[in-house]
Each structure stands twice: as C-alpha cells, then as structure tokens.
Image (cartoon, grey):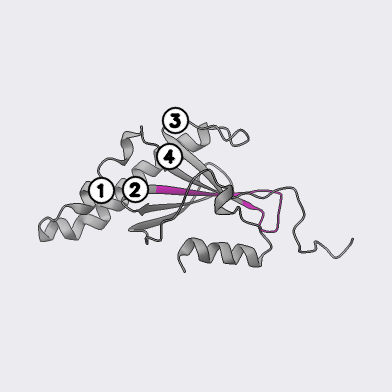
C-alpha cells in the first residue's frame, strides 16, 4: 500500500469521503516512492503545513490547510508545475547523471536544496491563486485531494441530535 492509499485509509477511518479517481480531473497513478521529502509548517499562514516531494523526478507540493468543516477539519491540495514552467528543469538530469564519488555524496543534499527553492515559488503561486474558483497562475496545476464539504459525516458531534 503506497503512502496515498495509507492516508486515504486513515481519513476514511475518520469519516472523510474521498473523491473517487473517476471524479478527478487528473490521473494520479504514481506508486513511486518519493526520492526526497520535506515537511514544513507555513511561516505566513497559520495552521498550514506543506509536504514537498520529488516523485518520478518532478517536484510536488501538498498543501494541508485548516477548515471549519468535516471531521478532519483540513483540506489538502496537490500542486504540480505545469508544462510551461521552466522550474522543473534539472531534476531529471541531476538524478540521471552518474558522477564522481564526491558528486554522488552531495546529490541528495543538492536535490533537497533544489526542491526547497522550487517549492518556495510553487507556494507563492498557490497563494496568488483563488481557491474558491480553483483558478491559479498558469505555471502551476492544483488538484484537490481532500476537500471537506458542508455535508455531515457519519460521526456524531457532541451527542445531541
């Protein structure tokens, strides 16, 4: 079971209904393990957390943000670079190159620094967009992974009906 399936199972146990893949406007079929992962708390947005990954030699950003709805009280968005963005250049080349011993020893740290730098731009572009309209700058693509709705979940809140 990959990390996305584990997370979906965890959320299902909490009463969260996930979108079904056929309902999504994109196809996320990667079972690849992240080459690099970094977790961050936002400095600018209270309660927001980021997960930065390099998966299949491309940077991905997951934005977890608090909401007042649902059992988990959080929404999760996947942010990827669009085809027009020049920021993804270099990740595949860096991973494919077989260099000296010194190069190989520094590869992971370099990937982490590159991911961190590119993710800063991805975060700025995400926050420059409009979540209500799901409208974002052309350099990124944003997909809702888990967005709480106003409908009640199967769990009771507070015991009163």
Pick the front one: 109 or 98: 98
Label 1 secondary element:
helix
Q: Secondary structure at mark 3?
A: loop
Q: Earlier in the sequence, mark 1 or mark 3?
A: 1
Q: Residues within 10 Å of mark 1 (few under 14, many from 20)?
A: few
Query: Residue 92: percent from the left, percent from the top?
Result: 25, 48
* Dot 3 or dot 2, earlier in sequence: 2
* Residue with the mark numbered 3: 138
Distance in Å between CA atoms under marks 4 and 2 = 13 Å
Q: CA distance from mark 3 to mark 2?
A: 17 Å
Residue 21 coordinates in the image, percent (x, y): 55, 53
Q: Determine which quarter of the picture holds residue 18.
A: bottom right
Q: Earlier in the sequence, mark 1 or mark 4?
A: 1
- Is label 4 in a helix, a strand or a loop? helix
Is-magenta flag for residue 32?
Answer: no
Q: CA distance from mark 3 to mark 4?
A: 11 Å
The residue singled out by tag 1 in the image is 92
User: Does the residue at mark 2 contact the one at mark 1 (Cβ under 8 Å)?
Assistant: yes
The numbered disc on residue 122 is: 4
In terms of sequence position, does the residue under pointer 3 or pointer 4 come before the other?
4
């Amino acid at each position: 079971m990959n990390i996305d399936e584990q997370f979906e199972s965890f959320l299902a146990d909490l009463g969260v209904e996930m979108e079904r893949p056929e309902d999504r406007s994109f196809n996320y079929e990667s079972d690849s393990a992240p080459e690099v992962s970094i977790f961050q708390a936002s400095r600018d947005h209270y309660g927001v957390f980021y997960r930065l990954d390099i998966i299949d030699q491309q940077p991905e950003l997951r934005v977890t943000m608090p909401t007042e709805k649902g059992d988990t009280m959080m929404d999760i968005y996947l942010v990827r670079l669009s085809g027009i963005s020049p920021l993804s250049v270099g990740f595949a080349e860096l991973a494919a190159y077989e260099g000296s011993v010194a190069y190989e020893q520094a590869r992971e740290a370099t990937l982490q620094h590159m991911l961190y730098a590119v993710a800063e731009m991805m975060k700025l572009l995400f926050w420059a967009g409009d979540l209500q309209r799901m409208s974002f700058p052309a350099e990124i693509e944003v997909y809702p992974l888990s967005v709480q709705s106003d409908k009640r979940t199967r769990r009771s809140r507070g015991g009163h009906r």
